[in-house]
Image (spheres, rainbow, N blue to C red):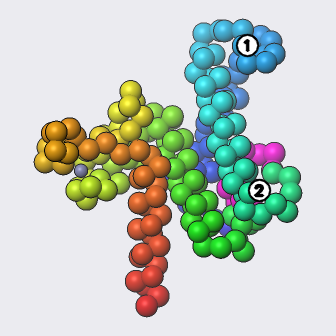
Amino acid sequence: MNQPEDSAAARLRQLNQYFLQHPVTGPTEGRTPTRTPGAPLSLATLDHVQASVAEVVEHARATNPDAGPAPSRADAIYDWARQHTEHADEAAQQRAAVIEYRQYLEHAIRAGDWRKAIRPQRCPECRCFGLMWQAGMQQALCTNTECVDRDGTSTTVTLARLAHEHIAGRKKLRQVRTT
Ligand SMILES: [Zn+2]
């Protein structure tokens, strides 16, 4: 299957490469390896890659217990998961698509590329473009000054919600095209 240039798989491959190019030196027994300059970032990236892979594998296995062993190449898991859940019900496939898209957003943000990932998304509340990533909150903030709740607090959106909206919107588009 052809992967579009900017996908969860391509992003995960980049992060994995980043980790390989900035390896953690010193013993890595358990979870407290020797700290070296640059290591915390690499370790966090490694943790991120492993957690992402684990989440996709877990969902695929929960959907299809016969999925078998996951591929050893991290960025191959999305194709693997799709192959092994293609006969699952629509809800399970939709959940898988939301996980993959959310991970695409997470990978892009981890690579410092939130603009490319977040800017094309509409705010789910006001449908405006103008979301900005807030690293401290780990949420996107709507910059529309009228998009506030009753207390005047700006709308914030989790990546999970953005991913859900994106996949639901894509599904609606498909239905429009086929009817
Ligand atoms: Zn908004």
Residue 73: x %, y % from top left: 77, 46
Label 2 to label 1: alpha-carbon separation: 31 Å
Residue located beneath label 2 in the image: 61
Q: Give the range drawn in magenta.
A: 71-81
Residue located beneath label 1 in the image: 33
Indicate left or right for 69 with 78 as reference. Answer: right
Judging depth in this view, the residue of 144 and 46 nearest the camera is: 144
Q: Which residue lies furthest to the front in this view?
A: 150
Picture quarter containing residue 38? top right
Q: Is mark 2 on a helix, strand or loop?
A: helix
The answer to whether the beta carbon of the residue marked 1 is less than 8 Å from any atom of ligand 1 is no
- Judge whether residue 137 is colored magenta: no
- Relative height, residue 135 to residue 71 (above, below): above
Identify the residue at horizontal 41%, vertical 60% (top origin): 165
Q: Quadrant of the C terminus?
A: bottom left
- Residue count near mark 1 (Cα–Cα under 10 Å), binned few <14, some 14–19, many ≥20: some
Identify the residue at horizontal 53%, vertical 54% (top origin): 101
| Residue 179 visible in the shown view | yes
Q: Kindly identify which numbered label has been placed on residue 149.
A: none
- Residue count near mark 2 (Cα–Cα under 10 Å), binned few <14, some 14–19, many ≥20: some
Picture quarter containing residue 32? top right
Q: Identify the amino acid type marked 1.
A: Pro
Q: Is the magenta stretch mostly helix, strand or loop?
A: helix
Judging depth in this view, the residue of 35 and 151 nearest the camera is: 151
Residue 103: x %, y % from top left: 55, 47
Indicate left or right for 149 with 107 as reference. Answer: left
- Return the disc, 2 or 1, that comes first in the chain's sequence: 1
Identify the residue at horizontal 59%, vertical 68% (top origin): 91
Disc number lying in front (2 or 1): 2
Q: Is mark 1 on a helix, strand or loop?
A: loop
The answer to whether the beta carbon of the residue marked 2 is less than 8 Å from any atom of ligand 1 is no
Identify the residue at horizontal 79%, vertical 18% (top origin): 30
